[in-house]
């Protein structure tokens, strides 16, 4: 089984559909991206490491009220789909991940993806 397929199965076994996104942040000059979503058995953290592409797309209306002022119950992002695929570039094996959590979409190209329950 390919690396991306293994991670995809791991995520699908967590039944992430409609889970509220609690955190989405980048650190170390976009080298690492962390996404945390709510789960009844403990929140789940997805860590993307060695990122070479990070795209966050949302609507203009989504940014009218600062998110830092919102309470947890007001966070509007619920994961609808996560798709992970293997990606080869210049003889390097990478992972491409697309997260759809309207009104935000995220795409990350990275060296590794780690999934942990907190």
Image: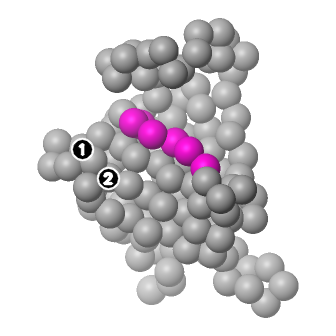
Instruction: Please give left or right for residue 70 compared with residue 31 in the image.
Output: left
- What stretch of residues is rendered in magenta? 21-26
* Callout 2 secondary element: strand
Q: x and y percent of residue 27 in the render?
A: 61, 54
Q: Quadrant of residue 110?
A: bottom right
Instruction: Please give left or right for residue 112 compared with residue 29 in the image.
Output: left
Separation (CA) of disc 2 from disc 1? 7 Å
* Mark drawn on residue 44: 2
Residue at (58, 15) in percent of width and height? 66
Look at the image and tell me whether residue 17 can be seen.
no
- Answer with mark 2 or mark 1, whichever residue precedes in sequence: 1
Q: x and y percent of residue 64 in the render?
A: 65, 9
Considering depth in this image, is 38 or 97 the residue closer to the camera? 38
Label 2 CA crowd tier, 10 Å (few <14, some 14–19, many 20+): many
Quadrant location, the N terminus? bottom left
* Mark drawn on residue 39: 1
Query: Which is the main secondary structure of the residues drawn in magenta?
Result: strand
* Mark drawn on residue 50: none
Q: Residue furthest right?
A: 90
Mark 2 and mark 1 in contact? Answer it, CB < 8 Å. yes
Residue at (51, 35) in percent of width and height? 101
């Amino acid at each position: 089984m390919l690396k991306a397929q293994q991670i995809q199965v791991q995520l699908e076994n967590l039944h992430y559909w409609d889970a509220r996104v609690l955190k989405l942040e980048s650190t170390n000059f976009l080298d690492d991206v962390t996404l945390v979503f709510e789960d009844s058995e403990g929140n789940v953290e997805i860590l993307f490491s060695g990122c070479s592409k990070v795209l966050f797309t949302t609507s203009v209306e989504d940014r009218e009220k600062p998110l830092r002022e919102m309470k947890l119950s007001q966070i509007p992002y619920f994961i609808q789909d996560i798709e992970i695929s293997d990606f080869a570039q210049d003889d390097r094996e990478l992972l491409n991940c697309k997260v759809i959590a309207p009104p935000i979409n995220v795409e990350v190209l990275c060296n590794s993806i780690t999934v942990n329950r907190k």
